[in-house]
Image (cartoon, rainbow, N blue to C red):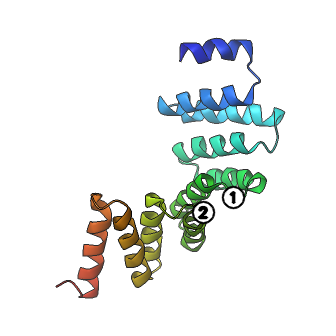
């Protein structure tokens, strides 16, 4: 952190240094400081997709899911193919209980990155909430095929099959 602090004193307006500094702030439990920093830098670099993405992550960490979804969408306006931002948008939308839109975001991640375990798993969660249970089972099964040792999708399948009366 001291090295970034030194660079920060030399170039406080550099967007990549601001993003890295915001990451350190987030990792040390200071998302509100990261938000303040990134908002200040975004005024100098409006529409910068990396700043918008970092801002969305800090807002998400602070529990500001609506603001995070907006920032992620702003980042996607500049780079619509950015899978990681679609994933983070999906998480924010799921927290906002906008499950249809969250499912669409996770599907966009899977289109771009078919082996994205977390996208398959989170797609299963939102599909389960939407009562699209067969589709949720398929998403969990795909997650298991990618990471067979992960416990959570196995548990979700067990709960679903029990609820559906299909557990043998």
Label 2 – label 1 distance at C-alpha: 8 Å
Query: Which one is nearer the viewer's eye here, 37 or 135?
Result: 135
Q: What's the residue at 55%, 13% (across, down)?
A: 2
Local crowd size for mark 2, using a 10 Å CA cut-off: few (<14), some (14–19), many (≥20): some
Q: Is residue 142 above or below residue 84?
A: below
Q: Position of residue 164 (x, y in %)?
A: 28, 86
Q: Position of residue 44 (x, y in %)?
A: 83, 32
Whether residues under marks 2 and 1 lie with C-beta atoms below 8 angstroms apart, the answer is yes
Residue wearing tag 1: 81
Q: Quadrant of residue 41?
A: top right
Tag of residue 112: 2
Q: Position of residue 121 (x, y in %)?
A: 42, 64
Q: Is residue 75 above or below residue 123?
A: above
Quadrant placement of the C terminus: bottom left
Q: Helix, strand or loop at disc 2?
A: helix
- Pick whichever of labels 2 and 1 is earlier in the sequence: 1
């Amino acid at each position: 952190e001291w090295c970034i602090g030194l660079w920060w004193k030399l170039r406080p307006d550099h967007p990549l240094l601001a993003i890295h500094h915001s990451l350190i702030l987030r990792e040390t439990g200071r998302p509100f400081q990261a938000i303040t920093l990134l908002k200040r830098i975004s005024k100098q670099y409006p529409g910068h997709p990396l700043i918008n993405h970092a801002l969305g992550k800090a807002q998400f960490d602070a529990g500001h899911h609506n603001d995070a979804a907006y920032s992620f969408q702003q980042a996607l306006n500049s780079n619509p193919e950015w899978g990681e931002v679609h994933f983070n948008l999906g998480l924010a939308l799921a927290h906002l209980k906008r499950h249809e839109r969250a499912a669409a975001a996770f599907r966009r991640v899977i289109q771009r990155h078919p082996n994205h375990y977390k996208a398959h798993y989170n797609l299963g969660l939102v599909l389960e909430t939407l009562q699209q249970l067969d589709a949720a089972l398929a998403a969990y099964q795909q997650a298991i095929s990618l990471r067979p040792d992960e416990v959570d999708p196995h548990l979700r399948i067990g709960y679903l099959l029990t609820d559906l009366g299909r557990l043998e």
